[in-house]
Image (cartoon, rainbow, N blue to C red):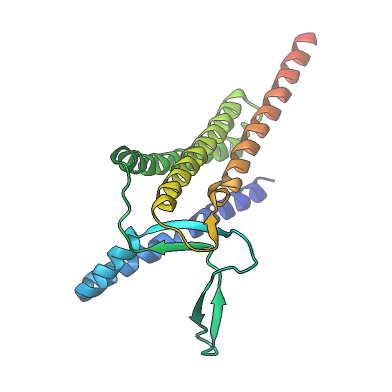
């Protein structure tokens, strides 16, 4: 049982680590560009990183405006309908939003570290045979609460930022897809952790009541 639990926990950490690969790849490209000393590439990389982006969905499929790209495999020109677009243009963000966005980014990093620490504490306790205890309930509640908090903060910031971009840039035939910014998976994980915590709490209360009646 414990071995299976540890394997599943290892898979969780591997999955989370995979999520950081795109960020590490971008950092690697930036480092390589700096080492090579190609200033033109450095400018292009800065423009790419700082470019405004927004998720899109079709306003209607009849007469939908689209662009074309070249298929690298066949060399043919094919139509594209963008779901997400990054544009190299200045966007006027309110100063308070810039500050809040930067703070929220570091807050999310701090919450992620807290989740990892709490998760490790929970696994260590379970491996020691300390399973049905109130401390584990509190750990699960903190895990679920932190996950929900991080997800809600990220979603609100992204939706508001996308609304600012959309007010200054638009694509013919497309509308901003605000629903795509909702982190359904993260919200689900947070709620599941809270549900498991309450299941543990109910079980512990029943056990305590049973011990009192004996």
Q: Which of 104 and 91 is in front in this view?
A: 91
Q: Residue furthest right?
A: 214
Determine which quarter of the picture holds residue 101. Answer: top left
- Say left or right for 26 vs 171: left
Q: Which of 141 and 130 is in front in this view?
A: 141
Q: Quadrant of the C terminus?
A: top right
- Say left or right for 191 vs 93: right
Determine which quarter of the picture holds residue 2. Answer: top right
Q: Is residue 202 above or below residue 86?
A: above
Residue 123: give x, y in percent of width and height.
Answer: 57, 40
- Say left or right for 9 vs 199: left
Determine which quarter of the picture holds residue 144. Answer: top right
Q: Is residue 180 above or below residue 188?
A: below
Going 35% across and 38% down the picture, which residue do you hit? 100
How many tags in the picture? 0
Going 33% across and 53% down the picture, which residue do you hit? 91
Q: Is residue 24 above or below residue 79?
A: above
Residue 107: give x, y in percent of width and height.
Answer: 39, 39
Q: In this view, does 83 lie above or below 154?
A: below
Going 57% across and 29% down the picture, which residue do you hit? 141
Q: Which residue lies furthest to the top in this view?
A: 213
Q: Which residue lies furthest to the front in this view?
A: 63
Residue 44: give x, y in percent of width and height.
Answer: 28, 70
Residue 1: give x, y in percent of width and height.
Answer: 70, 46
């Amino acid at each position: 049982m414990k071995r299976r639990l540890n394997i599943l926990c290892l898979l969780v950490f591997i999955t989370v680590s995979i999520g950081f690969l795109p960020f590490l790849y971008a950092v690697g490209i930036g480092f390589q560009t700096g080492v090579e000393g190609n200033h033109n590439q450095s400018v292009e990389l800065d423009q790419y990183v700082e470019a405004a982006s927004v998720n899109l969905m079709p306003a209607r499929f009849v007469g939908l405006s689209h662009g074309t790209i070249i298929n690298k495999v066949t060399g043919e020109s094919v139509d594209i309908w963008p779901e997400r677009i990054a544009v190299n243009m200045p966007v006027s963000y309110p100063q308070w939003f810039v500050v809040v966005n930067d703070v929220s980014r570091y807050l999310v990093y701090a919450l992620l570290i807290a989740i990892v620490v709490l998760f490790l504490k929970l696994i260590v306790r379970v491996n020691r045979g300390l399973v049905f205890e109130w401390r584990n309930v509190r750990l699960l509640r903190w895990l679920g609460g932190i996950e929900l908090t991080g997800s809600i903060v990220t979603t609100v910031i992204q939706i508001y930022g996308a609304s600012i971009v959309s007010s200054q840039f638009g694509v013919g035939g497309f509308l901003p897809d605000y629903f795509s910014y909702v982190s359904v998976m993260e919200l689900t994980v947070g709620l599941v952790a809270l549900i498991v915590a309450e299941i543990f709490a109910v079980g512990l209360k029943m056990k305590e009541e049973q011990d009192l009646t004996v």
